[in-house]
Amino acid sequence: MRERVQKIVYEAIEELNEELGSDELREAKEDTALFEALDSMAVLDFILAVEEKLEESFSKYVQIADERSMDASRTPFATVGSAIEYICERVRNG
Amino acid sequence: MAKLSFDDISIKAVVTTAGDKKLKIEDEASKFSYDEKSLKRLKRSMGFESRYVLSDDSVCTSDLCLASAEKIFEGLDIGPESIDALIMVTQTPDYRAPSSAIIMQHRLGLTEDTIAYDINLGCSGFINGLFTAYSMINSGLGRVLLCVGDVASRFAYERDRNLTPLMGDAGSAVLIERGGGSRSYFLLRSDGSGYRHLIIPDGGCRRPFSKESLELRVSQDGSVRRDMDMYMNGAEIFNFTIKVVPTMFDELLEFAGMGKEDMDYFVLHQANRYILRNIAKRLGVSEDRLPMDTVSIYGNQNSASIPGTINAFLSDSYSNSSLRSIFAGFGIGLSWGACIVDTESIFAPGIFHYEKKERE
């Protein structure tokens, strides 16, 4: 399951970066600071893209947005790796 | 505990008048310094396409509501003397004082026996206003006219790229009467700890208007505004919405002893497409039962967005059917609320656009 989520997260970042054009995100790895590289609208876009891909892949709606999403001190999207772990947890519990 | 129910009170008419001038997001892009990519993202995520505002700066929310109210009088063939109370929910009154509702009492030709006052609320305003109207009728009145709306395009600074592209102008009138048989359920909540997240800082008694109120402030994301304009902390409002709205539905449905399947429509405050889509997914409700296009076409109509959605997209259904609906509003305050109401073929024509000649 982690591999599927990982693929989804990297695909979403790649699509988002077609518009953002960030060098950091182009070379994204699990320790890449994701949240810092996105403005609030891009965070929303990332969430939207991941939720759509999860629904396609797992045939169910998994909400990954919560009240921590936009909070820099608590966001689960701090790094690419933390985002993957968090999304895996949501898929498991969703 | 703000969970209450009412018997034998119902909505008889809903009419909305929106601004007359259509602004397309593409035409406004340069004002907000959106490049092509940002614009594409905004359209996809938030659903921005266009908005309707008033072309004439001298026209106020009360004028929009007045036009809507007159359509109700005409459509239902009722006289102004039959109205016992007029509640006006707005953040853009004609004057800081007195209440716009009292001026409207005179302009609409309502009798001096009419109770009239304003309520200062935004996106949760329709639910709170409806609750006030139901409470008044429950206390003995026969017929209440609820007016809701804002000329929201005027309280956001024209170069505020976070807020201004959202703002649409609209004023609705809603007629509520004794009779109708079924039970209605309300849930209302407030959390003033978040008051700073959506606020017009200057111009009240806490921070009176001064020359500093006019100073332009540029935020990190390039948005420009003054302290006399509305400010929104988008991230905090997003967090608030995600946290409270879905649980509000669960609580209200439990209180009413009903399920989602019992509802014909979920008509929500039209904040933005992402929020609405998120809520729809979480509730497992399809878009045909939870309309979400108002913000894309008309903009965020604040307290008029729920009646505005009924008039713009559900006019046939509400005009010709018996329906059970959940209405829900959430936003500035912070304040949120929802209600379950039954309607029976009400007067709900398609949305109108303001025509100056109506008032001349």
Image (cartoon, rainbow, N blue to C red):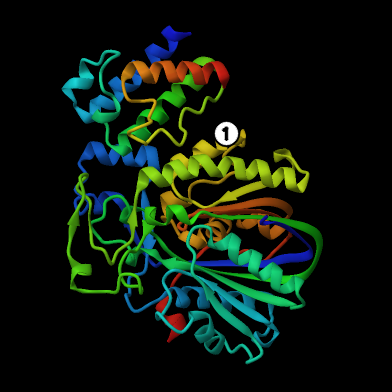
Q: Check the picture and name the quadrant holding the N terminus of chain B.
A: bottom right
Determine whether A52 is above or below B216 in the image. Answer: above
Label 1 resides on the chain identified as B
Rendering coords of residue A67 (x, y %) = 45, 37
Rendered residue at 58%/57% (across/down)? B310
User: In which quarter of the view is residue B339 placed?
Assistant: bottom right
Determine whether B332 is above or below B135 in the image. Answer: above
Rendered residue at 25%/30% (across/down)? A36
Determine whether B239 is above or below B179 in the image. Answer: above
Q: Would residue A57 be seen by someone viewing this image from the given angle?
A: yes
Judged left or right of residue A65, residue B140 is right
Please state which of residues B223 and B68 is positioned toward the viewer in this rendering: B223
Please state which of residues B335 and B300 is positioned toward the viewer in this rendering: B335
Rendered residue at 41%/55% (across/down)? B299
Rendering coords of residue B244 (x, y %) = 54, 44
Label 1 Cα crowd, 10 Å radius (few <14 / some 14-19 / many 20+): few
Please state which of residues A30 and B38 is positioned toward the viewer in this rendering: A30
User: In which quarter of the view is residue B140 placed?
Assistant: bottom right
Rendering coords of residue B206 (x, y %) = 34, 70
Rendering coords of residue B245 (x, y %) = 55, 44
Residue position for label 1: B282
Judged left or right of residue B285, residue A40 is left
Rendered residue at 38%/20% (across/down)? A83
Q: In terms of secondary structure, where does tag 1 sit?
A: helix
Q: Check the picture and name the quadrant holding the C terminus of chain B.
A: bottom left
